[in-house]
Amino acid sequence: MGSGFREYAEPDSYLKNNGEKSVLISLEMQSGNNIVDFGKVVSESMTTMRTKLPGDVTIGTIADMPGAVGHSVDHFLMEFLIAIVAVATMLFLRVATVVGVTIPISILMPIRPKVTPIDLMVADLQLLTLPNVR
């Protein structure tokens, strides 16, 4: 009457990497782990697997998320260090500027010229003294 059998359908598309038919293996890290450490473990495993594969089979990485995260963290830390150095430098320069301006002014204050900036103002300064009441 009839016969039945199961088989995989003939694939209608292939994954290619650099023009070669490829097999894609996707790895996901469990939440709560360090992705950079996960990347190191995967790299070590891939190195071990390369030695066990036949010569015509290669293994490679298409997207390296642990490497990208590690680069981002390193970049952030460098930018943070630059910001700290910039703020410290600005504070030092501000203090140096204030001291550099204040010292000459305080040295010259006791040497009072005959005409001061207050004397040149249109309004006179009026002093009011109260008698000492007992």
Image (spheres, rainbow, N blue to C red):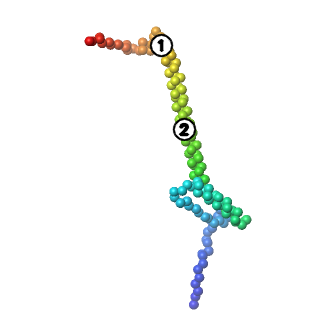
Image quarter of the C terminus: top left
Distance, label 2 to label 1, CA atoms, is 40 Å
Q: For the point 70% across and 65% down, which residue is it?
A: 52
Q: Is residue 19 visible?
A: no
Q: Is residue 53 left or right of residue 4?
A: right
Above or below: residue 39 compared with residue 103: below
Q: Quadrant of residue 51?
A: bottom right
Q: For the point 53% across and 26% down, which residue is it?
A: 97
Q: How many marks?
A: 2
Q: Quadrant of residue 28?
A: bottom right
Q: Which mark is residue 55?
A: none
Q: Position of residue 106 (x, y in %)?
A: 49, 18
Q: Which sits in the foreground, 131 or 6?
A: 131
**Disc 1 residue type?**
Pro
Q: Is residue 124 left or right of residue 81?
A: left
Image quarter of the N terminus: bottom right
Q: Residue furthest top?
A: 114
Above or below: residue 94 compared with residue 130: below
- Category of crowding for the residue at label 1, using alpha-carbon neighbours closer than 10 angstroms: few (below 14), some (14–19), many (at least 20): few
Question: Mark 1: which secondary structure?
Answer: loop
Q: Is residue 12 left or right of residue 116?
A: right
Q: Position of residue 107 (x, y in %)?
A: 51, 16
Question: Mark 2: which secondary structure?
Answer: helix
Q: Position of residue 75 (x, y in %)?
A: 58, 46
Q: Is residue 100 visible?
A: yes
Earlier-in-chain disc, 2 versus 1: 2
Q: Read off the residue under disc 1.
A: 110
Above or below: residue 32 compared with residue 124: below
- Category of crowding for the residue at label 2, using alpha-carbon neighbours closer than 10 angstroms: few (below 14), some (14–19), many (at least 20): few
